[in-house]
């Protein structure tokens, strides 16, 4: 909550400075909307920080004087959504200009496979940066008798709302353990509603994918004892072999109140745009994202912000880079001797 408030305040300050610009000031403004996730997840606060950092309202002091280090004239706003699938579809439809997404969802969208098999490929998708690892959380009440993923059979389980990357990942995980949605009593809830239902005894488990700590789960852990089910057995091995976007991950002790370390799997969170975006603006967005002031803000505002490092900018990107991003990464020699084609 503090992160979301901070991001909102930063944007409000930027808009206030815009309102204070004299009428004679030449104002050339561009508005970008960024699809994030639910307010109880990690995309929303991280997206709010990034949107504020890449914004450069007309009339704001220059970066070198302590002002905005964003793109001059750009106003970016983070929008809540149900998550990755909705964000990617909104990008394709022109409803937003930027989006946060799980790397696996981005790949399926670009190739027209998986959840996008019927709708077909979205060839206009372009990558801007890889941000951090999102861990899979399988949450049960502290006194639950569920110890493993296969014991979810016949239980009341929230597997993510329609349009979310959580639902995509949940289906892959269940399949790796020989389960289907029909083998459960599934609910299609967002993380906030799922956590409330566990606290009320209306659900036996919930699956969520987010960079830890996830606000909805952290709040649940403060209200009632919880446990996290590990994903580190034969089913996990199968997932890692068959789905290249999954990687081994860990939820450290103390991430959630009363919960010890848990081995799990994860995917990369990536920042996406579309091919038609102005390369000069995307160049500026990429440069602003990796500016030291943005890094300081991200590191101080959210635990996952410390993982958003320039050396990981290309990790897990499963779609072609945008031309503007290529220009910036070429300037700083991030590609080494070979640039992407």
Image (cartoon, rainbow, N blue to C red):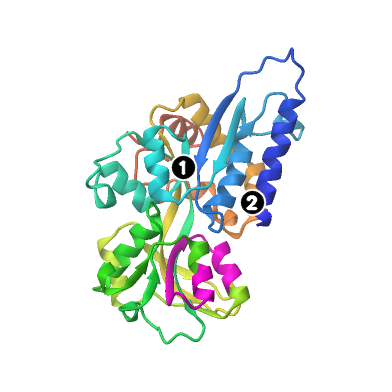
Residue pictured at 43% horizontal, 46% vertical? 314
Ranked by sequence position, the earlier of labels 1 and 2 is: 2
Q: Residue 186 falls in which quadrant of the image?
A: bottom left
CA gap, disc 1 and disc 2: 17 Å
Which range is magenta? 195-220
> Which quadrant: the N terminus?
bottom right
**Does the segment drawn in magenta span residue 212?**
yes
> Looking at the picture, does residue 338 appear above or below residue 305?
above
Q: Residue 61: x, y in percent?
A: 75, 28
Q: Which residue is mark 2?
A: 4
For this rendering, which residue is in front, 60 or 37?
37
Q: Residues within 10 Å of mark 1 (few under 14, many from 20)?
A: many
Front one among 181 and 108: 181
Q: Which image quarter: residue 42?
A: bottom right
Residue where numbered disc 1 is placed: 99
Asked if the stretch drawn in magenta spans residue 140, the answer is no
């Amino acid at each position: 909550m503090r992160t979301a408030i901070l991001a909102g305040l930063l944007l409000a300050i930027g808009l206030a400075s815009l309102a204070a610009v004299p009428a004679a000031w030449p104002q050339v403004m561009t508005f970008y909307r960024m699809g994030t996730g639910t307010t109880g997840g990690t995309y929303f606060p991280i997206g709010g920080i990034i949107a504020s950092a890449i914004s450069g309202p007309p009339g704001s002091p220059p970066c070198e004087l302590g002002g905005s280090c964003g793109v001059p004239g750009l106003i970016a706003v983070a929008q809540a959504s149900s998550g990755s699938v909705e964000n990617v579809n909104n990008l394709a439809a022109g409803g937003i200009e930027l989006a946060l997404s799980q790397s696996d969802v981005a790949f399926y969208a670009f190739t027209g496979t998986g959840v996008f098999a019927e709708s077909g490929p979205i060839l206009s998708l372009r990558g801007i940066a890889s941000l951090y690892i999102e861990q899979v959380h399988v949450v049960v009440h502290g006194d639950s008798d569920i110890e493993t993923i296969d014991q979810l059979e016949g239980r009341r389980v929230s597997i993510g709302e329609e349009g979310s990357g959580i639902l995509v990942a949940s289906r892959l995980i269940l399949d790796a353990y020989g389960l289907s949605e029909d083998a459960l009593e599934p609910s299609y809830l967002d993380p906030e509603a799922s956590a409330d239902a566990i606290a009320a005894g209306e659900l036996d488990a919930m699956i969520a994918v987010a960079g830890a700590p996830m606000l909805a789960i952290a709040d649940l852990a403060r209200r009632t004892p919880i446990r996290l089910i590990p994903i580190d057995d034969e089913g996990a091995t199968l997932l890692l072999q068959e789905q290249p976007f999954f990687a081994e991950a860990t939820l450290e002790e103390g991430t959630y109140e009363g919960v010890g370390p848990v081995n799990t799997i994860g995917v990369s969170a990536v920042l996406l745009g579309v091919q038609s975006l102005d390369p000069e603006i995307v160049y500026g967005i990429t440069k602003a994202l990796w500016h030291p002031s943005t890094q300081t803000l991200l590191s101080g505002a959210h635990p996952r912000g410390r993982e958003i490092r320039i050396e990981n900018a290309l990790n897990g990107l499963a779609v072609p880079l945008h031309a503007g991003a290529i220009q910036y990464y070429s300037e700083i020699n991030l590609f080494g001797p070979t640039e992407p084609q």
